[in-house]
Image (cartoon, helix red, strand yellow):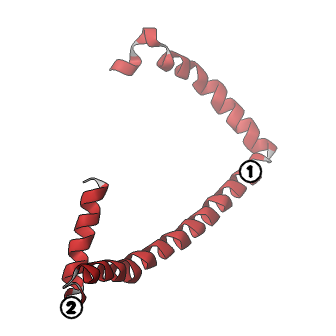
Amino acid sequence: MDFDNFILALSEIADLLYRQSSQSQDGKLHSFQMLFANHLLPLDSELQISDKSTIGVIQGQIDNLMDSLRDPHIVEILESVHKSIYPYYLCYADPRTQLLNL
């Protein structure tokens, strides 16, 4: 569905919801405005609030990760994991081994 068809669909929905005011062309515009103000704008506000709370959660997770990475024991563990996995990664990523085409 392209944008023009989306707007037409919204206009039809507005006409169905607000039949009393959609008898004339001005009424169709009014019903579309009512649909937008009563239903779509509140959803946008909810999404913005949700985005802000999601950003707070993500920032908290990043802070926890950074705290963990300050611990020298964690850094040592990650170094040994890296040393253990790196040869397998090289083999996997090498196009001559054809591991990616299995």
User: Which residue bears the numbered disc 2?
Assistant: 20
Quarter-wise, where is residue 25 in the image? Answer: bottom left
Quarter-wise, where is residue 11 in the image? Answer: bottom left
| Residue in front for this viewpoint, 54 or 95 | 54
Rendering coords of residue 62 (x, y %): 68, 54
Q: What residue is rendered at 29% in x and 64% in y?
A: 7
Report helix, strand or loop for mark 2. helix
Locate residue 22 relative to residue 90 in the image: left or right. Answer: left
Q: Could you tell me the amino acid type at mark 1?
A: Met
Rendering coords of residue 52 (x, y %): 59, 68
Quick one: quadrant of the N terminus?
A: bottom left
User: Which residue bears the numbered disc 1?
Assistant: 66
Disc number placed over residue 49 in the picture, else none: none
Number of other residues with Cα within 10 Å of mark 2, as a class: few under 14, some 14 to 19, many 20 or more: few
44 lies above or below 71: below
Rendering coords of residue 90 (x, y %): 55, 17
Number of other residues with Cα within 10 Å of mark 1, as a class: few under 14, some 14 to 19, many 20 or more: few
Quarter-wise, where is residue 83 in the image? Answer: top right
